[in-house]
Amino acid sequence: MQKNCIYLDNNATTKVDPEVVEAMLPYLTEYYGNPSSMHTFGGQVGKAFNQAREQVAALLGADESEIIFTSGGTEGDNAAIRAALLAQPEKRHIITTQVEHPAVLNLCKQLSTQGYSVTYLSVNRQGQLDLDELEASLTGNTALVTIMYANNETGVVFPIEQIGLRVKEHGALFHVDAVQAVGKIPMNMKTSTIDMLTMSGHKIHAPKGVGALYVRRGVRFRPMIIGGGQQRGRRGGTENVPGIIALGKAAELELLHLSEATIREKRMRDRLEQTLITTIPECEVNGDPTQRLPNTSNIGFKYIEGEAILLLLNKHNICASSGSACSSGSLEPSHVLRAMGLPYTILHGSIRFSLSRYTTDTEIDAVLAVMPGIVERLRALSPFTTDETPWLKQQQGMISEELKVGS
Ligand SMILES: *Cc1c(COP(=O)(O)O)cnc(C)c1O
């Protein structure tokens, strides 16, 4: 990443907090002991390791015995889903939503070829679930309901505790992918209906490759990774000590900053969003305007390609993102926006700005200064239209050309 980049892609990953780096460094240099070792050298590491568990537990309002360290959000989601199924082998039904992260969706897809039936709950135009649909889908055969706390693309927050109450009435386990919600919404597992909750380090200013899974005491847990007896047999493999120390520190800082950062980010996000939609014609906010993460804004700019906007923003050193699976080479619109039933023109022209506690008003000003011109320039490529006329192909051609030049 270039220096001085205006980074508004914090739902993809975040800057590692310098205090987090400082906390983890000694565990890469001096304190390289194995926490499982009998000698005091390893024991010193074990102490710091336990402190990290306490820090993560504090952020979640959980007991430290309920925290399992993982390699991140994807592992947490996989481990929770597999554990729930192994613990109840007689039940063969899973409920999830159409807008989950691929870590949940693609595992569910695979499980549906292995004898499990999966219900994918739909969302409405604002990205919200219909709790009656959930209620109607729950049966005695339902092993697990796995639903995200907040959506990574739109920031839409689901009514997790209302969902949990219904899930509990039917005796199913309730797993929540809270990778985007942790650190942005206060958590208290002590008063929650959640049985298992996934979080990831690199979305909360810790490094990539570390995360945690909360498992409520009393919930039968079967490990996905089997090895030595590490983490009381719940996750084999020598622990990623520096990463775990970093996660602990990051959790401590998230808790410290949570209320103030939420207010600040929401204020900046709203200013960005409101100014854009009032100064640029034919654009709208995607998602639930009231039940939304404070840091996320997903905006659809009709008749232009999201990727083209991103390329032009990138020239101004501004990093944002679109939901499209650009890596696959086909500019497939996001599965989340498609599930919301957004029209074709918005599906292709949506981009996401996601803020963090490092975002400044000066950076928001810089985005506001260039966005109207970018949209105008792209729209000038072809006349406004409402159907599939050359605007799309033209802009996709431009994107391929720019990518060729860039590589
Ligand atoms: C990023 C993300 C994940 C995956 O986490 P990793 O640590 O990158 O594996 C899962 N779920 C959601 C909602 C995410 O945003």
Image: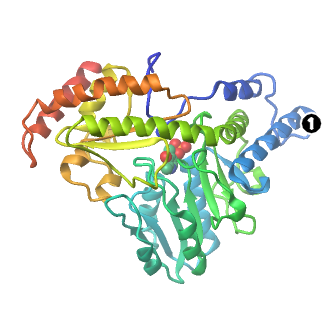
Give the residue type that dot 1 points to: His
**Quadrant of res 40:** top right
User: Toward the viewer: 4 or 393?
Assistant: 4
Residue found 40% across the figure and 52% down from its top: 289
Whether residue 195 is visible here, answered yes or no, is yes
Q: Residue at x 82, y 32 (%)?
A: 33
Q: Which quadrant does the N terminus fall into?
A: top left
Q: Quadrant of residue 215?
A: bottom right
Question: Quarter holding the C terminus?
Answer: top left
The residue sitting at 55% across, 69% down in the picture is 162
Horizontal relation, residue 280 to residue 189: left or right = left
Tally of marks: 1
Residue placed at 83% from the left, 35% from the top?
A: 45
Judge left or right: residue 182 versus residue 298: right
* In this rendering, position of residue 349 left or right of residue 263: left
Q: Element under label 1?
A: loop
Q: Which residue is mark 1?
A: 39
Q: Please, is residue 337 above or below residue 145 in the view?
A: above
State whether residue 38 is above or below residue 124.
above
Q: Position of residue 272 (x, y in %)?
A: 38, 35
Q: Dot 1 surroundings within 10 Å: few (below 14), some, or many (20 or more)?
A: few
